[in-house]
Image (spheres, grey):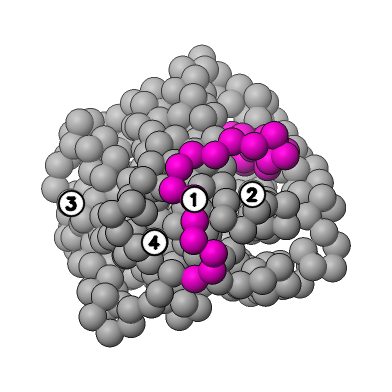
Amino acid sequence: MYLFLMVLTIAMAYGFQAWTNMSTNLAVDVIGLNGFDMGVIQSVREIPGLLSFAAIFLLLIMREWVVALVMVALIGIGVGFTGMFLSFGGLMTTTFIMSVGFHFFETSNKSLALQAFDHNEAPLVLSKMRSMTAVGNIVAGIMVFTTARYLSITALFFIVGGVILLAVVYLFLFHKVSDPGVPQIKKIVLKKKYNLYYILNIISGTRRQIFVVFALLMLVETYHYTIQGITILFLINNILTWLLSPMMGKWINRYGERNMLTLKYVVLAVVFGGYSFIHNEWIIAILFVFDHLFFSFSICINTYFQKIADPGDMATGTATGFAINHIMAVIVPVVGGAIWIKNPQLPFIAG
């Protein structure tokens, strides 16, 4: 299960990072979309996250590890066709397909990890998965940076999608696994004792959209970063994540989830303030790196849930939490895109 999850995590990260590196430039420089258009597309991208509780019902017809494989295959298909439909509707459609795979996989991989590993092992495994995510991101960044000047953006998206599908085929043919742990409840369950877990997911969803949509849009639209420039920043981000994420599990076991999340949100408040009121591209780039680095702290939300959850609730709990995470993730890009047109500082002040 460990190897299975790591390979799928790298494949997912490789595809999503390549998509992230290129999609904003594709939208702004090739298709000619504005901030409101981007907000709409990003809201559509988050709809599968809002519906990720439906992953529970897939368990009625297939094993959870098969769900993980199928979802990563969908990421490959969505990313592979992104550069072939150069319009607002085309980008929205391929983004939605990619997003279904991404969000449903994020639900199943966390569930499988929390079931397969105990309370002490799970923080270490989840932090290692964050590290492997960074590895996939680094590979994607190097590939995009070195080939963007020689290959069309259509070819780049197609190659990335093909690599992801090859990884899925390899695992299906040569590395099948079994579902671990206690049989999971195959329906949506909301419990009062999980209320704080749900609130933490709402906060996490809001913070993530400000980074994914508006921090990137600021770099491209305000500071005119190219694909290569964005890629360099993500390479720096992911090298740091690769180096530091394995320590995260040890820090969680030592200091606890409360202290780690408190530190995260204090630092992010400072970062969002910097985005709002500092107008130096080098300082903004540094803040962007700090912003990304603290994504690893989201592991704390999942390990906190593992400690309070009933064993049969892992699948439904992670799916429900992930869906709740995306309530604000669907709202924030559209509302933020509308106020971005009025004043680009406002989404960050709100954050």
Asked if residue 125 shows in the view, the reply is: yes
Q: Which residues are magenta?
A: 180-208
Residue positioned 35% across, 32% down in the render: 44
Query: Compared with residue 204, is residue 144 higher up or lower down, i.e. above or below?
Result: below
Mark pair 2, 4: CA separation: 32 Å
What amino acid does circle 2 point to?
Asp
Residue 219 or residue 50, whichever sits in front:
50
Residue at the far bottom: name it: 174
Q: Sequence order check: which comes first, mark 3 or mark 1?
A: 3
Q: Residues within 10 Å of mark 4 (few under 14, many from 20)?
A: many
| Residues under numbered marks 4 and 3 in contact, where contact means CB atoms less than 8 Å apart | no
Residue 217 lies in the magenta-colored region: no
Q: Sequence order check: which comes first, mark 4 or mark 3?
A: 4
What amino acid does circle 4 point to?
Glu
Residue positioned 23% across, 80% down in the render: 173
Q: Sequence order check: which comes first, mark 2 or mark 4?
A: 4
Labelled disc at residue 81 = 3
Labelled disc at residue 185 = 1
Residue positioned 72% across, 52% down in the render: 308
Q: x, y percentage for residue 202? A: 61, 34
Mark pair 1, 4: CA separation: 12 Å
Q: Which residue is labeled 4 in the image?
A: 64
Query: Number of labelled discs?
Result: 4
